[in-house]
Image: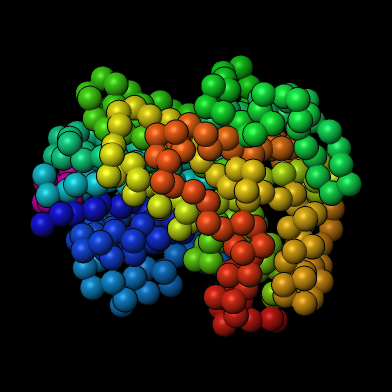
Amino acid sequence: MSVALITGSAGLIGSEAVRFFAGLGMDVVGLDNDMRRYFFGEEASTRWNRSRLERQVGNYHHEDADIRDAAALDGIFGRYGRDISLVIHTAAQPSHDWAAREPFVDFSVNATGTLNVLEAARRHCPDAPFIFTSTNKVYGDTPNALPLQELDTRWEIDPAHRYAPGIAEDMSIDQSKHSLFGASKVAADVLVQEYGRYFGMRTACFRGGCLTGPNHSGTQLHGFLAYLMKCVMTGTPYTVFGYKGKQVRDNIHSADLIAAFYEFYQRPRSAEVYNIGGGRESNCSMLEAIAECEAIAGRPLDYSYAEDNRSGDHIWYVSDLAKFRSHYPAWGITYDVPRILREMYEVNQERWAPA
């Protein structure tokens, strides 16, 4: 029996991983206690996705477990032991703004929770590749010091700069404003690297840009494209925060991210760090995303503009995918932003019916 153990299994990336690795014939054990509902309210609950997985994926077993509970994790990992051939850790508190409200909860989930998962894996399945969904927020607001130019619909980097293809892994994570969320993810990121270097485990931190897809339970504080399309489709008012709406993000579809995880699973390495996102193939500004959503849905977005940007928010962030591609040249981006948004619209016709 080959087992994939996935934390945050009812979330966007977790559920995509469940379906993919179950489709390979692996038994999948998913850990998720719907903390997203606690963070962001009923609209962000992942219960619907958990129920769908349990109905549709025959080789999926759900554990209603909290990653902050080290004893519970030890029991689950101990039950499967060395049958666990892959660990994918996606469970997290994902919002800048929310972290400032409850710093202890944020840190206990993101940092201590990651330590608990790592330690359970080290004790019970140390040879299993360990994949961690980190974040580009580990770089803090350092990207805002890049030489940026204001264009009609977006900010863009000076084309002569070495980061013109995207931001690479050599950007410093030090001496910058991270937000408390960014700080807790830095702690987790470094722990995952250290378990690779110190204990010889095969670990990887995927420092994601905007992770997106049709199964995202988007909400105002997290889930940029999903929440934006939801607001267009339902007529919900939307607020653009700062930077004239020209802030740029790269967006990677959950299927493309899981395909990258699969490449690492097949040929794992130790203590690796990869910037991962849509890169130059899939990115947009807020204004560009609004226009695309309106065109797809055939209706305008009711939005307002707030001059103050979110603290520590990036003005421009595009990932350089060169390092990952050099290690895994068979992988590539298959979804650009228009395709992502069209799929979101088509899949969620019933769930996001117009008000």
Report x, y in % for residue 292.
75, 64
Q: Is residue 194 left or right of residue 232?
A: left
Q: Is residue 353 left or right of residue 189?
A: right
Q: Is residue 285 magenta?
A: no
- As drawn, the residue found furthest toward the top would be 175
Q: Is residue 97 above or below residue 190?
A: below
Quadrant of the rendering where the N terminus is positioned: bottom left
Magenta segment's dominant SS is helix
- As drawn, the residue found furthest toward the right would be 152
Quadrant of the rendering where the C terminus is positioned: bottom right
Tell which of 327 and 89 is nearer to you: 327
Magenta residues span 74-81
Report x, y in % for residue 233.
69, 74
Q: Is residue 70 above or below residue 1?
A: above
Report x, y in % for residue 105.
45, 41
The quarter holding residue 267 reads top left
Tell which of 51 and 197 is nearer to you: 197
Colour option used: rainbow
Tell which of 158 and 199 is nearer to you: 158
The quarter holding residue 354 reads bottom right
Residue at 39% across, 39% down: 328
Q: Determine if residue 330 is in view.
A: yes
Q: Total marks drawn?
A: 0
Residue at 28% across, 65% down: 23
Residue at 17% across, 35% down: 126
Report x, y in % for residue 240.
78, 52
Q: Is residue 185 left or right of residue 227?
A: left
Q: Is residue 78 left or right of residue 240?
A: left
Q: Determine if residue 98 is in view.
A: no
Tell which of 44 and 55 is nearer to you: 55
Residue at 78% across, 29% down: 158
